[in-house]
Image (cartoon, grey):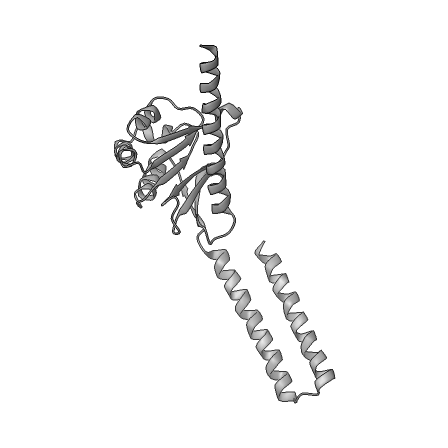
Amino acid sequence: MYYLKWFGHLGTLGSLIGIIFLIEGNENPSSFFMGFLICLAIILFIFALVYEWKLSKKKKGIYCKNEKEINAYMFRWIKKGGRVTIFTRDMSWARNDKDIKDMLLQKAINNELTIILAKNKGFTEYLEKNGANIYTYGEFGYTPNSRFTIVRTGRIDSKVAIGKEQNGKHFIEEFSSSDGYQFPIANDLAKFLIKYSQANKRGVNQNATSKQ
């Protein structure tokens, strides 16, 4: 992908040099000025290549080899403060870790915890009784492969950590709202599933009331 960007920069360089020669044909500038413009275009081209190379080498995420490493990462991530939105399958990663369970419970008590998962049972029911907002998507009959957790939900500095299976390990990447499309999509998905879960609960309650 980065090589394609390099070719794109090369095409831009060629276009700039072409424009410079058009200027030479129309305006008759000095040879020094023409040489300066060409050198400037080449320097900018080199800077662009170096920048893209540094971006390609920049660490994009982390691999977690086992549940212990996943829990350690999640503890540091959720601990950042503010409201937290967790999109997961079943919260099984948190059930056997006392530190995470205690932190999630405190988040629930402070009304700072939202969890979106397939089915609300066990530990998440306990969190809900203590103030957590629990929403389910199991009615869709589909379990997504990706998981994500948004910290500082609703704030301008909110960020998302997206986890997925990659190369046989759990791979996690972090994105802010300014990093591209990942954060807006995750945020919109969370809002959609919350609205869906709320509408589904209202429908179930109305059906139950009509049968009485």
The image shows residue 150 at horizontal and vertical percentages of 40, 42
Q: Position of residue 80 (x, y in %)?
A: 31, 46
Q: Residue furthest top?
A: 212
| Count of labels in the image | 0
> What residue appears at the point 49 percent right and 36 percent down from the top-left corner?
192
**Location of residue 160 with respect to 52 vertically, above or below:** above
Q: Looking at the image, which is closer to me, 167 or 142?
A: 142
Q: Residue at x 36, y 31 (%)?
A: 133
Where in the figure is residue 47, as x and y percent of width and height?
52, 69
For residue 102, side relative to residue 56 (left or right): left
4, 95: nearer the viewer? 95
- Quarter location, residue 103: top left
Q: Tell me which residue sits at (59%, 79%) in the image.
A: 39
Q: Please state the horizontal and vertical placement of residue 158, each as a whole percent of the image.
A: 39, 48
User: Residue placed farthest to the right in the image?
Assistant: 25
- The image shows residue 28, relative to residue 4, as above or below, that is below
Q: Is residue 10 above or below residue 91?
A: below
Which residue occupies 30% across, 33% down?
Answer: 108
Which image quarter: residue 68?
top left
Say which quadrant the C terminus sits in: top left
Side of 72 where 199 appears, left or right: right
Q: Quadrant of residue 4?
A: bottom right
Decide if residue 118 is on the left or right side of residue 35.
left
Query: Which of 25/187 is in front?
Result: 187
